[in-house]
Image: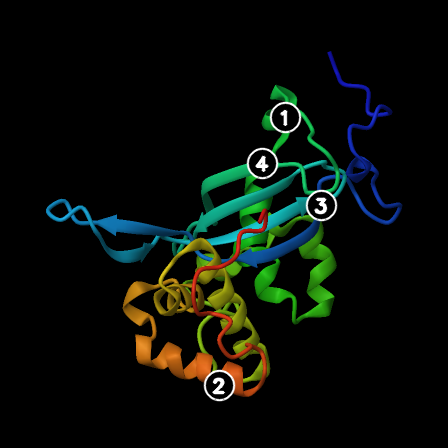
């Protein structure tokens, strides 16, 4: 039985007159997935390890859900989703996820949008409309062997934009109880061998305080509970 589309479960199911249901309406980066390695001998945390790939959040036009994904890209292959979370965005209430929803999830489109489809070309305004409609058709960058920059990594100069990101990651690390320097380094560079050293991250944080993106002392102590 086909669900009656006239009965909306969420305001998000209303499709914009100039859009098509299922095209990408929003996509953004998320901090990398970090797991804690525990020593079998001492039962203590030894270090934080970043999981492969990168994380993004994707919204589809006319869908009541957002998709949080971890995507792995391999040269010569389209982006692959290795972790997926589906949920109704905050402020729109809970929406039941049905079998029909799961069968209709366009995994290739979401993977392409979170990988080489949309985020790598937002600087090119002319390319955005096509990539929003069908980003899975624009993954030539991953197939060509040419690794494009996705706006991650550290710039040659400490720009305001970079230092704002450093400050945001530092706050996230503190909130979730991760060692701040290692968490920031993992967020800036997912590849473990290329990550900045703790002293480098400390210099970034000092510069962020100097430019007032961080309040002196705000990263000290334990974060206050939002329920307190």
Which label sits in the foreground, 3 or 1? 1
Of the numbered discs in the image, which one, if any, rests on residue 207? 2
On the rendered structure, is 220 left or right of 108?
left
Q: Is residue 12 left or right of residue 200?
A: right
Q: Which label belongs to residue 108?
A: none
Please say if the residues under marks 3 and 1 sit with CB atoms less than 8 Å apart.
no
Residue 185, picture quadrant:
bottom left
Q: Distance of mark 3 from mark 1, alpha carbons? A: 19 Å
Location of mark 4 (residue): 86
Q: Secondary structure at mark 1?
A: loop
In three-dimensional space, the C-alpha distance between marks 4 and 2, rounded to whole angstroms, equals 38 Å
The residue positioned 55% from the left and 42% from the top of the image is 108
- The circle drawn on residue 97 is 1
Q: CA distance from mark 2 to mark 3?
A: 40 Å
Instruction: Single out the mark in the foreground, 3 or 4.
Output: 4
For marks 2 and 3, give the one nearer the viewer.
2
Question: Which residue is at a point 81% across and 47% down the rendered structure image?
Answer: 19
Q: Check disc 3 and report the residue beneath it.
A: 23
Q: Mark 3 touching mark 4, by CB under 8 A?
A: no
Dot 2 and dot 1 residues touching (CB under 8 Å) = no
The quadrant in which the N terminus is found is: top right
User: From what the image shows, is residue 83 above or below residue 45?
Assistant: above
- The answer for how far apart the CA atoms under marks 3 and 4 are is 17 Å
SS for dot 3 = loop
Determine the CA span between mark 4 and mark 1.
8 Å
Mark 3 or mark 1: whose residue is earlier in sequence: 3
Residue depicted at x 40% and y 84%:
203
Q: CA distance from mark 2 to mark 1?
A: 45 Å
Is the Cβ of the residue at disc 4 closer than 8 Å to that at disc 1? yes
- Look at the picture and state if 156 lies above or below 221: below
Q: Are marks 2 and 3 in contact (CB under 8 Å)?
A: no
Please tell me which of labels 2 and 3 falls first in the chain.
3
């Amino acid at each position: 039985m086909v669900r009656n589309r006239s009965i909306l479960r969420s305001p998000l199911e209303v499709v914009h007159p100039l859009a098509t249901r299922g095209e990408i309406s929003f996509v953004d980066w998320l901090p990398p997935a970090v797991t804690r390695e525990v020593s079998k001998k001492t039962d203590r945390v030894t270090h934080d390890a970043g999981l492969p790939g990168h994380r993004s959040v994707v919204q589809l036009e006319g869908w009541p859900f957002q998709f949080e994904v971890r995507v792995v890209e391999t040269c010569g292959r389209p982006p692959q989703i290795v972790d997926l979370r589906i949920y109704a965005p905050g402020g729109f209430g809970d929406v039941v996820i049905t079998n029909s929803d799961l069968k209709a999830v366009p995994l290739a489109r979401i993977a392409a949008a979170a990988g080489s489809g949309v985020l790598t070309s937002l600087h090119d305004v002319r390319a955005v409309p096509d990539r929003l409609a069908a980003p899975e058709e624009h993954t030539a960058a991953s197939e060509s062997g040419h690794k494009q920059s996705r706006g991650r990594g550290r710039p040659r100069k400490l720009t305001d934009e970079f230092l704002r990101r450093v400050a945001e990651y530092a706050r996230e690390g503190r909130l979730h109880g991760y060692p701040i320097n290692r968490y920031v380094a993992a967020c800036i560079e997912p590849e473990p061998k290329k990550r900045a050293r703790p002293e480098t991250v400390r210099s970034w944080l000092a510069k962020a305080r100097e430019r007032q993106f961080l309040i002196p002392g705000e990263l000290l102590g334990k974060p206050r509970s939002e329920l307190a």
